[in-house]
C-alpha cells in the first residue's frame, strides 16, 4: 500500500506544557523543550499507546504524515514532536466547564457509578450544558475538516467516548476508525440507549474495544460495522530494574522500612479507582499483618488538572482519603506520593510486595501489566477489563471491589506467604507477554491498514 496520511483526534493531548507564554509563528517544536521542566507527556493510556503506534507506523513506512488534534486550551495552536504535528483545540473557560460537567456525567454513567438522582444518557441530551459537549465535538470535527482540505488525509482515527459524536459531525466519505477505551458493559448500558449510541457508532467504518466482552455489547447496542478487540499494550523496554541506591532513596523519601510489606496502587486520584476500599481493606488486614503499608501513586487526570478541564476532583478525593486514613488510625500505614517521574515509579514497582487495583470500574488497567513485568502478585477488581486475563489464584486474585473484607482477605493471604507471592509474580511475568507493544502495534496497524484498503 502507499503511505497514508493520518489524522488522530482525542481529548487527551500528547503533551501538556508546564510554562506559560510559549508561542511560535509556525510550529512550536516540543523537541527543543526539556521534559518535566517545560512539558510532560499527558498521563494515561491514550498517550502511551497512540504515540508509539504513530512512531512505529512511520518507521514501517505506513504513514507519510500525521496530525494529532486534541483539547489543549493553554497550548499554542500548533506544536510538533518527532515529526508528529499537534493541533490544539481551544475553547473559552465557560464552555470548557460546561463541556466538562457533561463529560463527567457520561463517564459515570458508562462506568455504572452514577447515583440514583443522576440523569440517563438520553436525558442528558436535554441539558443546557449538553450544547457545549456538542460544541466541543463540532469544533474538533471542523478543525479536522479544515486540515483535511489542505492535507488530504486517508484515514481519521478518533479516540475515546467523549469524542464519539466527532465522527458523525465529520462529513466525509473517507474512512473513520473509533477507539473506545472505557468500559462498554452490556449489564450497565440500558436497552433504551441503543438507538442513541448506534447512531454515533455507525458513523465509523470500524470500532476497536479493549476487551473481548465489550465486542458483544457493541453488537447488542446496534453497531453494524467492523468491530475489533485489541488488548492495550505497553513497551516492556521502558521498564528497567532500578539500582539498590534508587530503591533505598525512594524508601527513605517515603518512610518505607525494610520490614514493611508494601501494597502498591498506581492510579489517578478518582473515586472510581477505589482508593477508599483499599484503605478500608488495609484497616482490616493490619490487624493480622501489622507490617503492611499501602503506597498510592498518582495525581489527577487531564480533566482534573489546571491545564486541562480544571474539575479539581483529584484534590477533593485526596482530602476525603486523608480524612478516612486519619479516622481509621492508619496515618503511618498509608503514603500518598502524587505523580512520580519514571525513575521513582520503577523503584515503587520494584520495592512493592503486592500490587492492588480495586477499581469500581476500569476500561482495562495497564498498571496490572506493569506490576506483572516486575514479577509482582496482583489483586484486581472484577470490574477491571484486565480481570478477564487474571487466572484467579495463579497470576493474582480477582476480588469484588465493593467488598473491602474480600480485598482484605486477599491482602492477608499474600502478605503472610512469601512463596505464594513469588509463584504468582512469576506466573504474571508469563501472562503479560500477550500485552507487548510489538503484538499490540501490529494488530492495531493492521486494522488501520485494512480499513484504508477496504479489506473485509
Image (spheres, grey):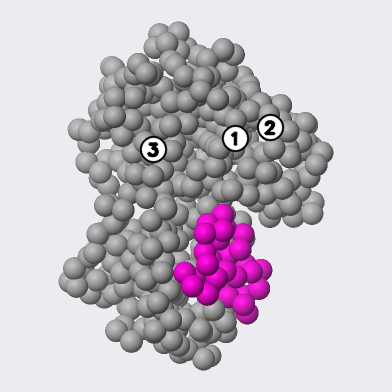
For mark 3, give the secondary structure.
helix
Q: Which segment did they paint magenta?
A: 378-407
The image quarter containing residue 39 is top left
In this picture, is 436 found above or below 207? below
- Relative placement, left or right, of 372 versus 405 is left
Residue 402, relative to residue 67: is it above or below?
below
Tell whether position 405 is magenta.
Answer: yes
In the displayed structure, does residue 192 sit left or right of residue 186? right
Give the residue drawn at x 19%, y 68%. 243
Residue closest to the eye, 431 or 96: 431
Crowd tier of the residue under label 1, counting other residues whose Cα lies within 10 Å: few below 14, some 14–19, many 20 or above: many
Badge 2: residue crowd in 10 Å (few <14, some 14–19, many ≥20): many
The label shown at residue 73 is none
Question: Disc 3 marks which residue?
Answer: 442
Residue at point 76% right, 36% down?
194
Q: Earlier in the sequence, mark 2 or mark 3?
A: 2
SS state under label 1: strand
Q: Quadrant of the N terminus?
A: top left
Which dot, 2 or 3, sits closer to the camera? Answer: 3
Q: Residue furthest top?
A: 149
Check disc 1 and report the residue beneath it: 227
Inspect the magenta stretch and tell me whether residue 215 lies in it: no
Q: Mark 1 and mark 2 in contact (Cβ < 8 Å)?
A: yes
Residue 223's tag is 2
Q: Mark 2: which secondary structure? A: loop
Residue at 52% x, 67% y is: 391
Q: Are marks 2 and 3 in contact (CB under 8 Å)?
A: no
Q: What is the CA distance from the residue labelled 2 to the residue labelled 3?
A: 25 Å
**Which is nearer the eye, 340 or 289?**
289
User: Going 55% across and 31% down the picture, which residue do you hit?
Assistant: 178
Amino acid at each position: 500500500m502507499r503511505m497514508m496520511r493520518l489524522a488522530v483526534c482525542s481529548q487527551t493531548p500528547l503533551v501538556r506544557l508546564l510554562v506559560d507564554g510559549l508561542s511560535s509563528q509556525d510550529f512550536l517544536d516540543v523537541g527543543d523543550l526539556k521534559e518535566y521542566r517545560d512539558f510532560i507527556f499527558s498521563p494515561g493510556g491514550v498517550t502511551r499507546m497512540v504515540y508509539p503506534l504513530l512512531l512505529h507506523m512511520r518507521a514501517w513506512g505506513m504513514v507519510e504524515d500525521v496530525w494529532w488534534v486534541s483539547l489543549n486550551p493553554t497550548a499554542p495552536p500548533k506544536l510538533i514532536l518527532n515529526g508528529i504535528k499537534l493541533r490544539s483545540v481551544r475553547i473559552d473557560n465557560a464552555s470548557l466547564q460546561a463541556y466538562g460537567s457533561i463529560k463527567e456525567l457520561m463517564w459515570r454513567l458508562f462506568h455504572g457509578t452514577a447515583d440514583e438522582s443522576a440523569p440517563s444518557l438520553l436525558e442528558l441530551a436535554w441539558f443546557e450544558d449538553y450544547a457545549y459537549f456538542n460544541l466541543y465535538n463540532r469544533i474538533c470535527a471542523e478543525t479536522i475538516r479544515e486540515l483535511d482540505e489542505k492535507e488530504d488525509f486517508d484515514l481519521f482515527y478518533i479516540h475515546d467516548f467523549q469524542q464519539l459524536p466527532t465522527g458523525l459531525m465529520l462529513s466525509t466519505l473517507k474512512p473513520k476508525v473509533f477507539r473506545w477505551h472505557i468500559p462498554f458493559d452490556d449489564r450497565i448500558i440500558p436497552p433504551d440507549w441503543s438507538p442513541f449510541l448506534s447512531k454515533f457508532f455507525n458513523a465509523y467504518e470500524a470500532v476497536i474495544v479493549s476487551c473481548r466482552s465489550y465486542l458483544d455489547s457493541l453488537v447488542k447496542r446496534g453497531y453494524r460495522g467492523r468491530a475489533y478487540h485489541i488488548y492495550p499494550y505497553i513497551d516492556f523496554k521502558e521498564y528497567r530494574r532500578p539500582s539498590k541506591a534508587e530503591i533505598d532513596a525512594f524508601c527513605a523519601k517515603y518512610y518505607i522500612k525494610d520490614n514493611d510489606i508494601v501494597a502498591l496502587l498506581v492510579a489517578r486520584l478518582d473515586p472510581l479507582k477505589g482508593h477508599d476500599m483499599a484503605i478500608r481493606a488495609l484497616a482490616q488486614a493490619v490487624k493480622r499483618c501489622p507490617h503492611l503499608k499501602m503506597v498510592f501513586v498518582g495525581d489527577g487526570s487531564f480533566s482534573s488538572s489546571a491545564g486541562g478541564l480544571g474539575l479539581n476532583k483529584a484534590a477533593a478525593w485526596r482530602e476525603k482519603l486523608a480524612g478516612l486514613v486519619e479516622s481509621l488510625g492508619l496515618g503511618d500505614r498509608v503514603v500518598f506520593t502524587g505523580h512520580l517521574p519514571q525513575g521513582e515509579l520503577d523503584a515503587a514497582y520494584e520495592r512493592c510486595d503486592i500490587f492492588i487495583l480495586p477499581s469500581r470500574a476500569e476500561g482495562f488497567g495497564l498498571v496490572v501489566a506493569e506490576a506483572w513485568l516486575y514479577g509482582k502478585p496482583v489483586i484486581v477488581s472484577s470490574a477491571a477489563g484486565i480481570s478477564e486475563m487474571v487466572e484467579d489464584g495463579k497470576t493474582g486474585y480477582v476480588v469484588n471491589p465493593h467488598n473491602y473484607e474480600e480485598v482484605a482477605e486477599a491482602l492477608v493471604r499474600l502478605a503472610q506467604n512469601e512463596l505464594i507471592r513469588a509463584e504468582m509474580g512469576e506466573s504474571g511475568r508469563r501472562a503479560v507477554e500477550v500485552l507487548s507493544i510489538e503484538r499490540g502495534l501490529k494488530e492495531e496497524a493492521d486494522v488501520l491498514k485494512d480499513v484504508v484498503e477496504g479489506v473485509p
